[in-house]
Image: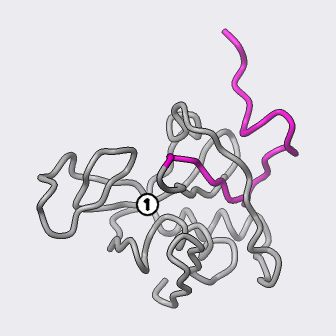
């Protein structure tokens, strides 16, 4: 079995506190790399829900109505998706020390009020690294974290 590499052998080594952008096709999923092949990220809980139910959202094509911040093995989160380190928001934003980024992510483990426009996985990851909830996907900066 070939050894798994993260995220791409041509890129620099992934370090604690890096943000991972995971290509899910129609959207990008974001996670905070915390070391030892683990990430902290926003994930759905509660299983599948009816597609017409009020506040649901989709993660990898599965609809959920609740979210939580989870600590998981990076390769379980990636599945077959492509991934890259994306700390591009470092330009113009002061980032925390990597150990502080990890602490901020781990402090948030548990249930989360999810909203795709102002409380999504990219908002979470950028809040952990910069103290600002920024999402380029929805072009919003929010101060609710």
Query: Which image quadrant: the N terminus?
Result: top right
Residue 127: x %, y % from top left: 59, 76
For this view, does 110 lie left or right of residue 7? left
Seen as rendered, the residue at the extreme bottom is: 143
Q: 13 above or below 100? A: above
Q: Is residue 28 magenta?
A: no
For this view, does 9 lie left or right of residue 139? right
Q: Quadrant of residue 93?
A: bottom right
Query: In the rendered view, how is the structure colored?
Result: one colour
> Crowding near pointer 1: few (<14 within 10 Å), some, many (20+)?
many
What is the span of residues highlighted in magenta in the rendered image? 1-25
At horizontal 62% and vertical 72% (from top left) the residue drawn is 126
Residue 108: x %, y % from top left: 48, 68
Residue 8: x %, y % from top left: 77, 37
Q: Which residue is mark 1?
A: 69
Q: Nearer the viewer, residue 77 or 89?
A: 89
Q: Nearer the viewer, residue 119 or 129?
A: 119
Helix, strand or loop status at disc 1 = strand
């Amino acid at each position: 079995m070939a050894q798994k590499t993260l995220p791409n052998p041509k890129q620099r080594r992934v370090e604690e506190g890096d943000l991972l952008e995971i290509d899910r096709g129609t959207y990008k999923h974001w996670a905070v790399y915390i070391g030892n092949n683990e990430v902290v990220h926003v994930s759905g809980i509660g299983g599948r829900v009816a597609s017409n139910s009020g506040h649901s959202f989709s993660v990898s094509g599965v609809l959920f109505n609740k979210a939580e911040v989870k600590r998981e093995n990076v390769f379980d989160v990636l599945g077959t998706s492509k991934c890259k380190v994306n700390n591009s928001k470092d330009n113009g934003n002061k980032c925390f020390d990597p150990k502080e980024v990890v602490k901020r992510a781990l402090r948030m483990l548990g249930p989360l009020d999810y909203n795709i426009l102002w409380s999504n996985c990219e908002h979470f990851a950028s809040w952990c690294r910069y103290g600002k909830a920024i999402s380029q996907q929805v072009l919003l900066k929010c101060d609710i974290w």
